[in-house]
Image: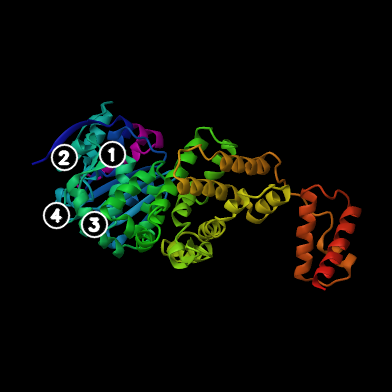
Amino acid sequence: MKAERKVDLILFSNQLERRGWVPAFQSLLKHKNQFEVYIVGGALRDALLGVAKIRFDVDLLVDPKEESKTVAHLLAKELDCNFFDLDPERDTYRISREQAQIDINGIRGNELIDDLFLRDFSIDALCLPLDNFLNVYSRGETLMSILDYFQGVNDLRLRRIRIHNPSSFEDDPLRLLRAYRLAGEISGKIESYTEEQIALHKEKLFSVSGERIRDEWMKLLAFPNSFDWLTKMDQSGLLSIVFPFLESFRPMDQKYTKKLQVRHHTLETLQYLEGLFQRVFNGYFPHASAIEEYLKKSFVPERNFEVLLKLASLLHDIGKPDTLSMESDRLRFFQHEKVGSDKALVYLEDLKLANKEIEWIEELILQHMRPHQLSVADPLTDRAKYRFFADLGENAVPLLLLALADAYATKRVDMGSLTEYEDFVSEMLDYAFKEALEPISPLLDGNQVMALLGIEPSPMVGRILSSLLEAQYLKQIHTIEEAREFVLNWQKTSFDENN
């Protein structure tokens, strides 16, 4: 028995029209005696929710499965592009276009319902026969009958994530994490039985590759309210599987840090950081537009600096359990930044992040105490500001945001109430963006320095040039003659200090 539901798919039709794919899909009808094609998956889900994503992905199901390569070839020919194998043993192929792709999959099982039963959640088990769609489309209509064997339309209406196959999480444990990502994507919730199954099967996520976990994990952190979803994951126990450092905090928190539990502090740092982001994106933060532009940058297209900074906020204190000591009845965590940076390296490599992403996060963890130390400097000199930005480069601004979120999570006070720390961050940002550390060249180059001092190439030449550049930025020297005098004095001072 077919469970048909009448739904309006105008958004889906418009997406196909805009990309000029309709003629290519129509060409498949010439071969309807050879195979059947069904539209399934996220494109239908998004259309029913009224969501038009920048990236448009369509999943096609082909029966019999052996014809999926034929369908891929026919579509690629009509669209004047190539297709490639995703998993030829499972009859899966892909056509990629700019901001769009078509996945062609062979049917699993003996019948259509068998394949739909094997899909992750009810909202992804909806199905639209291609010939039905094209017939209705040709009449200029958008109200269409889709196949809904597992009440996915009702779950969409309730914005509910629900497994309809009891073995769903055993079939693919990544779905444990995907449940939260999809719930966040549709601003919904996870059905109670599904939540129970997540808690029951959470440890199966250990069997999933780091690369697959990374993709879902980063998408989840991209939500503006990812803290809320991590809190829900923590309730089911799944968060400690994805982010195992939380469990390493627990013994320390129970014995030593009951007042300010590092476990809670870690999550609350993320929460405050997301609050800072909202201030930035709403224009209620110093130099908001410049910071927003920076946060949208990325090393790889899928993960921008905003997401990487959230991950860094979760990792910033992971070195504390290994560095805890008691001195004069006070807890100390000497070198926890260095230990944490080293531990983060292993975790980030397991997730298969790009090398530049790993280095960026490592540096933030390693340096995350530096703004705290600088914030209590009295006075805060231009030299100290210069050295902060010169040493940290592009990491300086995200480090200030991380430090401010860390400070709030330590004090656990309302956003905006840490006026002194906010003033410090504002002053530092003014230095970065108003006074603009524009690139300048030293008044003397390395060869001139060596000739002036009569020395051979050595690390000392680099140190002299760095000091010269600092003096230029601080407007202590302006001419070549002043630069020559500076270098000679630098050598004399260095000689006196070493003797």
What amino acid is labelled 2 in the image? Gln
Please report contact status of discs 4 and 1: CB closer than 8 Å, yes or no.
no
CA separation, marks 2 and 3? 29 Å
Callout 2: SS: loop
From the image, tell me which residue sits under label 3. 66
In the rendered image, the quadrant that contains the C terminus is: bottom right
Q: Quick one: label 4 or label 2, which is nearer the N terminus?
A: 4
Observer-nearest of 139 and 153: 153
Circle 3 or circle 1, nearest the eye: 1
Left or right of 288? Residue 43 is: left
Picture coordinates of residue 389, whole percent (x, y): 66, 51
Please report contact status of discs 2 and 3: CB closer than 8 Å, yes or no.
no
CA separation, marks 3 and 4? 13 Å
Q: Give the range drawn in magenta.
A: 14-34
Left or right of 217? Residue 432 is: right
Q: Can residue 68 be seen in this view?
A: no
From the image, tell me which residue sits under label 2. 151
Residue with the most extreme left position: 1
Q: Quick one: label 4 or label 1, which is nearer the N terminus?
A: 4
Left or right of 148? Residue 376 is: right
Residue 116 among magenta residues: no
User: Looking at the image, which residue is at 59% across and 43% down?
Assistant: 425
What amino acid is labelled 1 in the image? Gly
From the image, tell me which residue sits under label 1. 188
Residue 321: quadrant of the picture: bottom left
For label 4, count other residues whose C-alpha is less than 10 Å away and answer few (under 14), some (14-19) or many (20+).
few
User: Looking at the image, which residue is at 60% across and 50% down?
Assistant: 396
Callout 3: SS: helix
